[in-house]
Amino acid sequence: MKFLPTAIDGAFIVEVEPWVDERGLFARTFCAETFAAQGLVSSYPQCSVSVNNSRGTLRGMHYQIAPQAEAKLVRATRGSVFDVAVDLRPDSPSYLQWASVELSAERRNAFAIPEGCAHGFLTLEHGCELIYHLSSNYAPDLARGVRWDDPLFAIDWPFAPVVIGERDATYPSYVRR
């Protein structure tokens, strides 16, 4: 696996290094020892799936606060998405910066996002599916969100969303700390 740093301190694009032969392809997508050596979370007690029917579906920007803040490892298993993280950690050198990656089932890449970052994505085609590995169990009372189009972040989305849930559409702007 290759770990490519992003603009966010502690966030990495994870690329697989496939072995290809007459049978097809094989690649490691996760190794606890390798992730820990990189300084990343290496234990994920919860895994979730997100299925999105339409191109232009936006989900985000979500995060969970302490004591159950979540690190995430996100991978597209069908289709492709514009995946984004925003650093909301006031003590971070990359506070309020954002990073993005195009995740695709074809590339088999992933986005490792540290605790304290908001996360969201925009589907680039119909029929996208994402797998989330989460470092903490979902706690509805600790779940939070911020506007996907907050001018403070100035995320350069590839196009305007077509489908967005009411909760995501009505998140407040972020208040700088």
Image: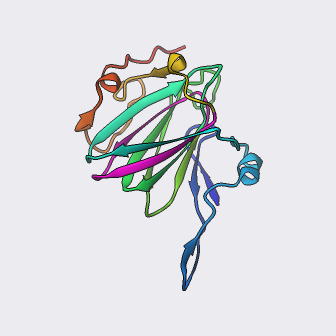
Q: Residue at left 40%, top 50%?
A: 129
Coloured how? rainbow
As displayed, is residue 91 above or below residue 33?
Answer: above
156, 46: nearer the viewer: 46
Q: Residue at left 25%, top 38%?
A: 160
Q: Residue at left 29%, top 40%?
A: 57
Image coordinates for residue 127, horizontal then vertical, percent:
31, 52
**Image quarter of the C terminus:** top right
Image coordinates for residue 155, horizontal then vertical, percent:
39, 35
The verdict on residue 67 being magenta is no
As displayed, is residue 163 above or below residue 107?
Answer: above
The verdict on residue 130 being magenta is yes
Q: Is residue 153 left or right of residue 95?
A: left
Task: Name the residue furthest bottom.
Answer: 22
**Image quarter of the N terminus:** bottom right
Q: From which residue to which does the magenta span run?
A: 114-135
**Main SS type for the magenta part?**
strand
136, 101: nearer the viewer: 136
Image coordinates for residue 54, horizontal then vertical, percent:
26, 46
Image coordinates for residue 29, horizontal then vertical, percent:
60, 58
Mark count: 0
Task: Name the residue furthest left.
Answer: 162
As displayed, is residue 152 above or below residue 38?
Answer: above
7, 49: nearer the viewer: 49
Q: Is residue 23 left or right of residue 157?
A: right
